[in-house]
Amino acid sequence: MSQIDNFPTEPEFTIKAVQNRTGIKPVTLRAWERRYNLLQPLRMPNGYRLYSERDIQLLAWVQRRANSGISISQVVQQFNQIREKGEWPEAIQTYSPAKPRKKSPRPARDYAELLFGALVSHNDERAAVIFEECQVYFELITIFQEVIDPCLQLLEEAWFHGDIPIATRHMSTQVIKGRLLGIMQGLPTMKEGALVLVGCGPETMNEMPALMLAVLLRQRNYFVEYLGPDLPTDDLIDYSKISRPKLICLSVNSEPTAFLLVDFAKQLNSVRGKPKFGYFGGYMYQNEDAQKKLGGLYLGDSLDVNLDRVRRILTLGVI
């Protein structure tokens, strides 16, 4: 992982842009500047502040340590001690300028049908080629939302109408799951700061929404652990006492799962640190009454909304 001093120092980001990147409010940024002399943004003639990418990376490092329970004054002291040695902390986020991608010969949605065709014909080699081609043209979140998710819907519909056997549906799902796990394992593992646990609520076996969210969180350099399907609440409570997460994100795809999670948010209050409970899934999106009964924090109906709300919870404590 790169050190913070490897990032650009050109002042180009307004305080609003920094807030959008980090979730830190302008009033907090000004307070840190005034009290701790942590940043020295460029002051424009009109009084506006401009920050560099290095500033943003430093703020991400400070924020991650603060989220783990260390006071801001202690974090600044740690930073000053590192700088006194002539060194810089390791960056929390992996930064690279937006890389121009090749223009796709077809819309992302077309790849969903191509992938579906390869999977139902049990052509694993063709499916692998389609995955690789998608990664040349599209960001992961686009692949997940416009290729994999529609492909899974096609598999569900084909099985429901009797066009494919359940064995083909299961095999196809396992192929996709294997690719997602491979992507996740290839991403750098962050083990510092606020821990996010991601998985499926009790009796929810469909892993794909939770696994895709976990992969995207890992890609964004969050400290995330993926726990898999059908997680009993008692086990989650016990594991939370050991791992001390800040947030637990569970997929809820049915009424029985929602029923079994009704008291889960209250139970987490007995765990040290009082981790927050966030949930998502088709059943919750379609049932606002179930959201009210469940408590916790609803993370939204799409991956991009899920990611934004997780960021807000970790940085601001609320959605």
Image (cartoon, grey):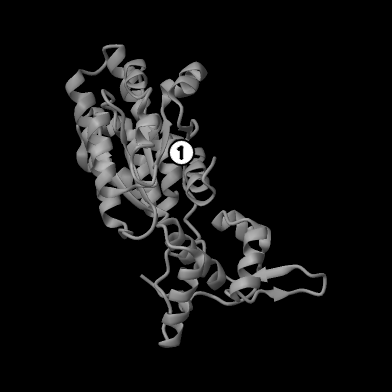
What residue would you read off at disc 1? 303
Q: Secondary structure at mark 1?
A: helix
**Front position in the image: 197 or 124:** 197
Return the x and y of residue 203 as percentages of the image width and height. 26, 23
Q: Is residue 166 above or below residue 121?
A: above
Question: How many other residues sit within 10 Å of disc 1, few (<14), some (14-19) or many (≥20)?
Answer: many
**Which quarter shows the C terminus?**
top right
Q: Residue at x 27, y 44 (%)?
A: 241
Q: Position of residue 19 (x, y in %)?
A: 61, 57
Q: Quadrant of the N terminus?
A: bottom left
| Residue 288 seen by the camera | yes
In the displayed structure image, the side of residue 245 where residue 170 appears, left or right: left
Looking at the picture, tell me which residue is in the foreground, 236 or 175: 236
Q: Residue at x 46, y 38 (%)?
A: 303
Q: Looking at the image, which is closer to me, 261 or 220?
A: 261
Q: Which quadrant of the figure has residue 158?
A: top left
- Amino acid marked by disc 1: Leu
Percent of width and height locating residue 16: 67, 57
